[in-house]
Image (cartoon, grey):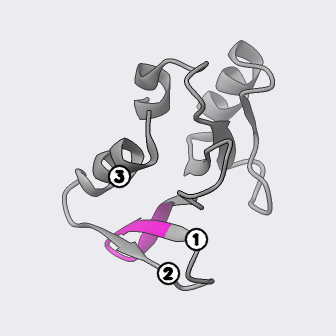
Amino acid sequence: MTPQELRAFCLSFNAAVEDFPFNPETSVFKVQGKLFALSNLEARPLKVNLKCDPEDAVRLRGEYEGLIVPGWHMNKRHWNTVTVDGELPDRVVRE
């Protein structure tokens, strides 16, 4: 998944918006004011923090060790940091 594809996917949700409340480099994606994804789309490797159901978050970390880890600088119970570098199938990122 490319940075452009990640941005398009995040914006494909109903009422989704992209904002830059923290700095000009960090895209923050929200629906009705609630964050669901954060990413520096210019970073390499591309990583994205994604909000996740707590049980699914732990399961995904176990299934994709090293590619999906507890959310960096986020509540580890609800957030995962996902490395989007082509090694992880796009369908998993969308999940």
Residue 66: name its quadrant.
Answer: top right
Specify the label residue 7 is tagged with: none
Q: Nearer the viewer, mark 1 or mark 3?
A: 1
* Picture coordinates of residue 44, whole percent (x, y): 67, 46
Residue 88, compared with residue 81, is above or below; it is above
Amino acid at dot 2: Phe
Q: Are marks 2 and 1 in contact (CB under 8 Å)?
A: yes
Q: Does residue 70 appear left or right of residue 2 in this picture? A: right
Which label's residue is closer to the chain start, 1 or 3? Answer: 3
Which residue is at a point 74% across and 50% down the rendered structure image?
71
Circle 2 residue: 20
| Of residues 21 and 15, the one drawn nearer to the viewer in this rendering | 21
State the quadrant of the C terminus. Answer: top left
Q: Residues within 10 Å of mark 1 (few under 14, many from 20)?
A: some
What kind of element bears circle 3? helix
| Residue located at (44% from left, 39% from top) | 2
In this rendering, the count of numbered labels is 3
Name the N-terminal-most of marks 2 and 1: 2
Q: Which residue is mark 3?
A: 10
Q: Amino acid at mark 3?
A: Cys
Q: Say which of 93 and 43 sits in front.
A: 43
State which quadrant residue 65 falls in: top right
Point out the stretch of residues depicted in magenta. Answer: 28-36
Q: Residue at x 60, y 31 (%)?
A: 85
Q: Nearer the viewer, residue 87 or 69?
A: 87
Q: Are marks 1 and 3 in contact (CB under 8 Å)?
A: no
Pointer 3 or 2: first along the chain? 3
Name the quarter where the N terminus is drawn.
Answer: top left
For label 2, count other residues whose C-alpha is less than 10 Å away and answer few (under 14), some (14-19) or many (20+).
Answer: few
- The residue sitting at 70% across, 18% down in the picture is 64
Tell me the kind of residue under disc 1. Answer: Thr
Which residue, given by chain and number where applicable, does mark 1 sit on?
26
